[in-house]
Amino acid sequence: MQRETTTARAAGSRTRGSKVHSTRIEPLRRRLGERLVLPEHAAYEEARRVWNGTVDKRPAMIAFCTGPREVMEAVTFARGRELPVSVRSGGHNVAGNSVCEGGLVIDLSRMKGIDVDPERRIARARAGLNLGKFDAATRAFGLATTMGVNGDTGIAGLTLGGGIGRLGRKHGLTCDNLLSVELVSAEGRLLEASATEHPDLFWGVRGGGGNFGIVTGFEYRLHPVGPTVLGGSLLFGREQLRDALRFYRDFASRAPHELSADAALATGPGGEPVLSISVCYAGPVEEGARVLQPLREFGAPLDDGIGPVTYLDLQSRGDAVFPRGRRYYWKAQFLKDIGDAAVDALIERFAKAPSPSSSAVLQQVGGAIARVPGAESPYANRDAAWDCFPVAIWDHPAADEANMRWAREFWDAMRPFATGGVYANNLGDEGDERVRAAYGPSYARLQAVKDKYDPDNVFRLNQNVKPTAAAHRPGPEETE
Ligand SMILES: Cc1cc2nc3c(=O)[nH]c(=O)nc-3n(C[C@H](O)[C@H](O)[C@H](O)COP(=O)(O)OP(=O)(O)OC[C@H]3O[C@@H](n4cnc5c(N)ncnc54)[C@H](O)[C@@H]3O)c2cc1C
């Protein structure tokens, strides 16, 4: 066989001044063929893109893996050449952590298998599956587990950081329903982690993100859901924003755990602010009708779109709001309650949004999420009641600064009402202090797991848990 050596550089490295050291790529290319995408390939431009259109990174190469063996080889390859590694499954991370400048992107998006065992109520899914496909596969058996609210989101990033969704208040976070993972370690070994195998690692992956390895497969506990649930949205107009938001707060705070009720301030078709309250009652429809009656009888909503709906349809209702390729920015924090001053701040700050596509979201948590003892997983902030975040959405790069500034100022205005905690999966590049705010008291224990499974911080392009200095083994260039 002809021996070929190629040099891979970050595309555009001359303009960016980020020349990547020469790298012999032959072993990986032999294994992946055209699935190893380099800057000179026609597929590169598309391959380096992620969901958020503001992310414009130029990796040295992108490895589209189709199974654990290829992931193992990619990790070993990158380590041997000291290439930075980023891991991409659904590509939905808002900060674009799944792509890197000048390194290797290990992409799992082609690993989409799922196997449902209806008797044992278990689903085994490959890491590249998105949650719309996951929901569709489990629904065929009248089963589901907590997943997020946008069908295009990857199950991998979502699960590893926690996983908030419509079933969370009844069945806990996605990571609370995780039974085991298959993972490629920083040494390129394939490990199983569960309550009985590598239990420390299993603890770490239930909220600790991609810090400990590349998960290639997930096993989840499923629950009977629906198939028809009571769900949909109520819409209130400008005159009722304040009163409806206050009523929503009181109603949602006392709601049973079967109900999840999210709220969002958005812009109506005439440019006026509106409040949308989106609900899902994960129990019998008639019971849900009784529970939701006070909310539906409040005020004079512009629209009442609540009714019996299949859980699957409800799960895909918000998909059109977040298409791939638009420009997005958000900054999140948890709230325990929403006092009247917080209601006023929400309305006042939302009114300043420069883009009519933007919204201000209150995603309800609590319920079963709060009942899980803190030490059981690294997901902290279980006592929060809402995840609160401005979602800036726009299209033109010239408007980047104005939209990001609006979101940051919104966040600053809500800060006095917040717990100080944040959801790791809604963190951007906000620094080490905010990462610690996401993991809370779990951080030290996460560091111990990091020391054991990734002491050299191979997996660092994430909400990073830093290994302790004692665990780090210096590379050859550091010992010279
Ligand atoms: C439109 C939209 C709606 C959302 N709604 C919700 C919601 O309702 N509930 C909720 O909880 N979250 C929600 N999120 C946040 C979401 O959970 C995170 O963005 C999550 O990171 C997405 O996972 P992904 O696989 O698509 O991410 P990617 O961008 O592919 O990966 C993000 C990070 O996760 C890690 N990672 C990914 N795959 C692996 C793997 N196989 N092994 C190890 N590490 C890995 C890596 O560190 C990577 O940088 C939403 C995000 C978006 C964009």
Image: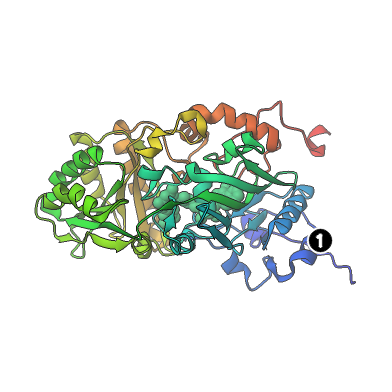
Q: Is residue 297 visible?
A: yes
User: Residue placed at 73% from the left, 57% from the top?
Assistant: 69
Q: Give the image quarter of residue 459.
A: top right
Q: Quadrant of the N terminus?
A: bottom right
Which of the pair 195/252 is nearer the observer?
195
Which of the pair 207/192 is nearer the observer?
192
Q: Quadrant of the C terminus?
A: top right
Task: Tell me: is circle 1 under 8 Å from ligand 1.
Answer: no
**470 to the left or right of 275:** right
Q: Whole-percent x and y of residue 285?
A: 25, 55
Q: Give the image quarter of residue 234.
A: bottom left
User: Residue placed at 66% from the left, 58% from the top?
Assistant: 13
Q: Disc 1 designates what residue?
A: 27
**306 to the left or right of 136:** left
Which of the pair 380/168 is nearer the observer?
168
User: Residue placed at 69% from the left, 67% from the top?
Assistant: 35
Q: Looking at this rendering, what residue extends furthest in the bottom direction?
A: 42
Q: Whole-percent x and y of residue 392?
A: 36, 53
- Identify which amino acid the numbered label 1 is placed on: Pro
User: Residue placed at 35% from the left, 61% from the top?
Assistant: 227
Q: Whole-percent x and y of residue 87?
A: 61, 52
Which of the pair 184/371 is nearer the observer?
371
Q: Whole-percent x and y of residue 463?
A: 54, 41
Name the element at disc 1: helix
Q: Look at the image and name its color scheme.
A: rainbow
Q: Is residue 93 visible?
A: no
Q: Is residue 320 above or below residue 94?
A: below
